[in-house]
Amino acid sequence: MKKVSFALTVLLLIMALSGCAVEEAEPEREEPVLQVVTTIYPLADFVKQLGGNRVEVSNLLPAGSSPHTYEPTVEQARLVDRADLFVYVGAGLDNWAVNMTEAAGTEIVTLDLSKQVNLIGSVGYYDLDSNDLEQDNHHENHDHDACDHDHGPEDPHFWLDPLVVRDSICPALHGELVGLDPGSETYFKRRLEQYQQELTVLHEELEAATAGFSRDSFIAFHSAWQYFAGRYGLEELAVIAQFPGQEPSAGWVAELVELIREEDIGAILTEPQFSPELAERIAEESGTKVKVVDPLGGEGVPGRETYLELMRFNLSIFRAAME
């Protein structure tokens, strides 16, 4: 009888200690404290990773859509109006977000992440040594509607550099979450440090893999991969279309075909948010191939439902393109 009582006492003690450990690591709450809305899915994932059960995150851009041309719904505008925090990329990528914040209530806190990083210039399809192309494509064919949906001379795709995410984006998000829910500061700090460690592991993995590529230059559909390329010793040599949705001139396509042959480009990188037809035609004429990378991922997209998964997916595509 004494043996049974002793065993029961030990078991109850273990259960009590385990329960305390779980509670200390991540205290449960019946419902999230903060309502956060983001424009693109990687930002939503960052907030989830940093906010844990203290936040409920809603993302506006559907999987497969382009932030360059998206138009939010009335219901999404109401969602933003009810949010505690609205996070967007900025630098012209999601201009529609700015319009939504201007129409939202005065209580909403907004975070323009482009203000947190050192932006670099965009690569244009007229950036090679061709004044005629610059004149023909940039000035004559570039209408005002295209401007409304396109980013400017600065490249806003900074989230594709994991160290920018680790050192700039995450601390900025962390600061906003703590400001809105100071009682959870310790909890948020622990999650920030854990996620930064995971981003460091991702960076080291990408760095080791890209160092073994046999090629270091690529052609992209539009200028989205400069931050990634710059971090890992690659070069986004040129893009097919600087302004998404705008057809490049026949003259530029011919120069691009010649460039691909001269530089022995292994693949043209296109994205699921854009039609692949033009890239496929250029690839056929130049004797290269098309590979699909994804800067956004999305909920329900297999293998791309978190930022870490998304970047490892893109690494596998870059590896195949740079063979």
Image (spheres, rainbow, N blue to C red):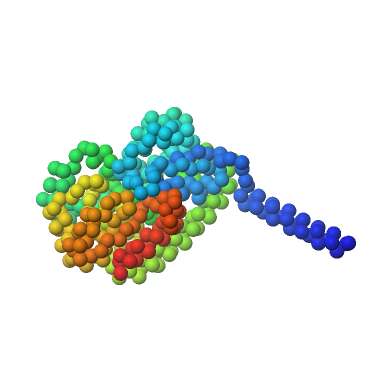
Q: Is residue 173 left or right of residue 263?
A: right
Can residue 32 be seen here? yes
Q: Residue at x 30, y 44 (%)?
A: 68
Tally the numbered discs.
0
Q: Quadrant location of residue 78?
A: top left
Q: Residue 105's x, y, as percent?
A: 44, 29
Q: In x, y percent, where is residue 266? A: 26, 66
Q: Quadrant of the C terminus?
A: bottom left
Residue 179 vertical position relative to residue 267 in the rendered view, above or below: above
For the residue pair 259 and 129, the one nearer the viewer reads as 259
* Residue at horizontal 15 percent and vertical 47 percent from the top: 137
Q: Nearer the viewer, residue 35 or 230?
A: 35
Quadrant in which residue 281 is drawn: bottom left
Q: Above or below — where is 198 with respect to 144? A: below
Q: Is residue 257 left or right of residue 323?
A: left
x and y percentages locating residue 194 in the rendered image? 53, 55
Q: Residue at x 23, y 41 (%)?
A: 146
**Above or below, comparing residue 169 to residue 316 in the picture:** above
Residue 165: in sight, yes or no?
Answer: no
Residue at 43% of width from left, 64% of height from top? 204
Where is residue 73? Give x, y as percent: 38, 35
Where residue 304 sits, quadrant-wise, is bottom left
In this rendering, position of residue 234 left or right of residue 247: right
